[in-house]
Image (spheres, grey):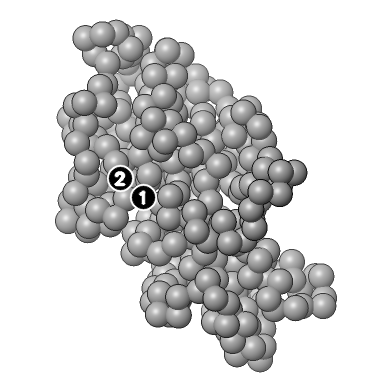
Amino acid sequence: MEYFDLEDPFTSLKEHHQFDEISTLFSSESDHMPSPSYLHCLKTSHFCVSFRQEAISLILQAQYSCNLDSFTPYLAVNYMDRFISRQEIPQRNPWVLRLLVVACISLAAKMKEIHFSPPIFLREEGFMFDAPAIQRMELLILDALNWRMRSITPFSFICFFISLFELKDPPLTQALKDRATDIIFEARNEINLLEFKPSTIAASALLMASHELFPLQFPSFQTSILSCEHVNKEKLLNCFNAMQEMVIKGTSESIEDMASSSSTRTPISVLDCHCCTKAESEGTTSTMAASAMPEKREIKRRKLNGFCSESNRVQISQIQPCG
C-alpha cells in the first residue's frame, strides 16, 4: 500500500489534477463516516457502547506497547467504527473484539507504512491468532469499507481552515494546529461527536483551540469559518457546544485524577495529567483527556488457528446491519 497522510488523503492523486481537491474532500467525507444507524445503536445498546470502549482501550494500549505514532491508532478507530456500524458483532465471542482490533491496527499500520507486530501485542493480551485469521478479518474489513482506506478525517481539513485565518506568525499557527489536533484526538472517544462530519469536527476543534489560545481574535476566526460555503452553521454550532462540554468534562476528570492516588495510573491517565498541567501553565481552562475506559477483563490464553477454517469462518451473509 502507498504511504497515507491523514492531512492529505489525496496525495497520490494530485499529479492527475482531475478534480478540485478541497471540493472533493467536502463532497466525499460522508463516505468515510460510520453508517447513520451507528449513533442510535451506541445510545440504545449497552453491548455496542461497551464493545467500542473496550476496542478503543485496546487500540490505545497497542499505541503505547508497540510504540505507534498517534495517527495510526486514530486511523484504526476510524476503520473499526465504520466496520462495526455496518456489521453485527457476535456477542458471545470475546476473541472477536481482539481480532478486529488487531486487524484494524494492522491495516492502519500498512497504510502508514510503519511496523506493527501482532504477535507481541496479542501475547500481552493473552490471545494468539495465526496470520491467516488476521488476514481473513482484514479482508472482511476491506469489503465492508468498500476498500476506502484513505480515510477522510478531521485532519484532512485542518490546513484548509487554518488558511482562512491568514495568520502571519508560524509559531502561533503551529500552536493553534497542535491544540486543535489534541482536541480531535480527544473527540475520538466521544460518542456524541460521531454524528458530525469530519470537516465540522475540524472546524469546531480549531474554534475551540483559538478560543483558548487567542480569545481576542476568536470572533474574527469564527467569522472566517462561518463564511466558508462548505460549512453548515447549525451543525457547527451544535458540534462546538458538544466539544466544549467534552473539554470541560475532561478538565474536571483530570483534576479529580490528580487529587487521587497516582500509584495505579495507566499511560493514558498520566498523559491526561501532563496535558492538564501544560494547559494550566498556559492559562487555559481545558485539557486533553481520554474518556475513561473499562478495566481490562481477565481472559484466558487461547490460540485460534482454526478461525479461517470453513466451519468457523465469519461469513458476510451471517452479519446483519447494526441498529
**Relative to the observer, which residue lies in front, 16 or 115?**
16
- Residue identified by numbered label 1: 34
**Relative to the observer, which residue lies in front, 91 or 41?**
41
Q: Residue at point 33% right, 18% down?
A: 301
- The answer to whether 80 is drawn above or below residue 291 in the figure is above
Q: Where residue 203 is drawn, which disc sits there? A: none
Q: Amino acid at mark 1?
A: Pro
Specify whether 9 is left or right of 37.
right
User: Residue 250 at what x, y percent from top left?
Assistant: 44, 68
- The answer to whether 87 is drawn above or below residue 251 in the figure is above
Q: Residues within 10 Å of mark 1 (few under 14, many from 20)?
A: many
Specify whether 205 is left or right of 87.
right
Q: Residue at point 24% right, 35% down?
A: 89
User: Residue 252 at what x, y percent from top left?
Assistant: 42, 72
Q: Are marks 2 and 1 in contact (CB under 8 Å)?
A: yes
Residue 155 in view of the camera:
no
- Residue identified by numbered label 2: 85
Q: Residues within 10 Å of mark 2 (few under 14, many from 20)?
A: many
Q: Secondary structure at mark 1?
A: loop
